[in-house]
Amino acid sequence: MTYLKSLTYRMLYLVGFFIISCKDENIIKKGNAVIAIQPYRDFKQTDAQFIHQQIQKVYSQTILLPGIDLPQQAYVQIRNRYRADSLIRMLRDSRGKDTISVGLTHFDISTTKNGIPDWGVMGLGYRPGRACVISTFRLKKKNLNEQLLKVVLHEIGHTQNLPHCENQSCLMRDAEGGNPLDQEKEFCTKCKQALRQKGLLFNE
Ligand SMILES: [Zn+2]
Ligand SMILES: [Zn+2]
């Protein structure tokens, strides 16, 4: 009797353990992507830490990597800018398929737009994609951190396949060559919903 009792307990324990393990596995499978904050070596450590903390609130599997050199191949000397497209490709190829890399620099970055070969931008992210890059060069100094966070969220949005949004207070608004960041408040309901489906959780 005692033997049977202890066996039952042991089996119950095993069943319980099995259920717990399955649950953990489900959680890992559901959102196995990692957002990697990748500052370049010129980027201020405290700014990178700020972005890390803020993005972690939105997506818990966010990590902060140590700074890396800006690649010389991406440098456009005549403009003193780095090619955002090249940076994105290098970031993407340097990490596994489950990682979304977010490159951060204070240098000016550019892309080809409307036939202009080195059009300066605040950030660039492919849609969809596994990497984006953000520069503080064109941001307002007085509320730099706030503006930086908005651009980071915008570019992460593009990697998650979000297009530009018509809503003028939405973070996915098209900057159209200017800096409308102070008019942007948050992701609109529609964009938030699309991000939630991708596993990025936003507070109401
Ligand atoms: Zn955009
Ligand atoms: Zn929107």
Image (cartoon, rainbow, N blue to C red):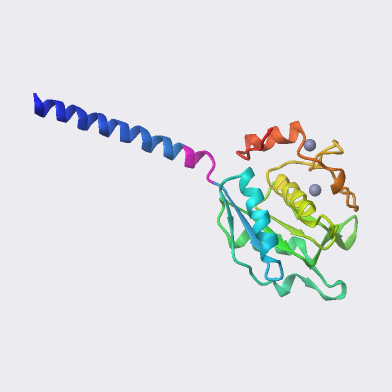
User: Vertically, is 143 above or below 73?
Assistant: above
Q: Where is residue 83 in the image (x, y as percent from the top left)?
A: 78, 65
Along the horizontal axis of the image, is 145 left or right of 30? right
Residue at the image point whose x is 90% and y is 55% from the top: 114
Q: Position of residue 108 (x, y in %)?
A: 82, 65
- Residue furthest toward the top? 1
Residue at the image point whose x is 90% and y is 61% from the top: 116
The front one of 90 and 123 is 123
Q: Is-magenta flag for residue 28?
A: yes
User: Vertically, is 34 above or below 190?
Assistant: below
User: Vertically, is 31 above or below 47?
Assistant: above
Could you say which quadrant of the image residue 160 lies in? top right
Could you say which quadrant of the image residue 165 lies in? top right
Along the horizontal axis of the image, is 114 left or right of 130? right
Tell me which secondary structure the magenta stretch mostly adopts: helix
Q: In which quarter of the image is the N terminus?
A: top left
Q: Is-magenta flag for residue 128?
A: no
Along the horizontal axis of the image, is 169 left or right of 51? right
Residue at the image point whose x is 72% and y is 44% from the top: 157
Residue at the image point whose x is 52% and y is 38% from the top: 30
User: Vertically, is 155 above or below 77?
Assistant: above
Q: How many marks?
A: 0
Along the horizontal axis of the image, is 140 left or right of 160? right
Specify start and end residues of the magenta stretch as a single range: 27-32
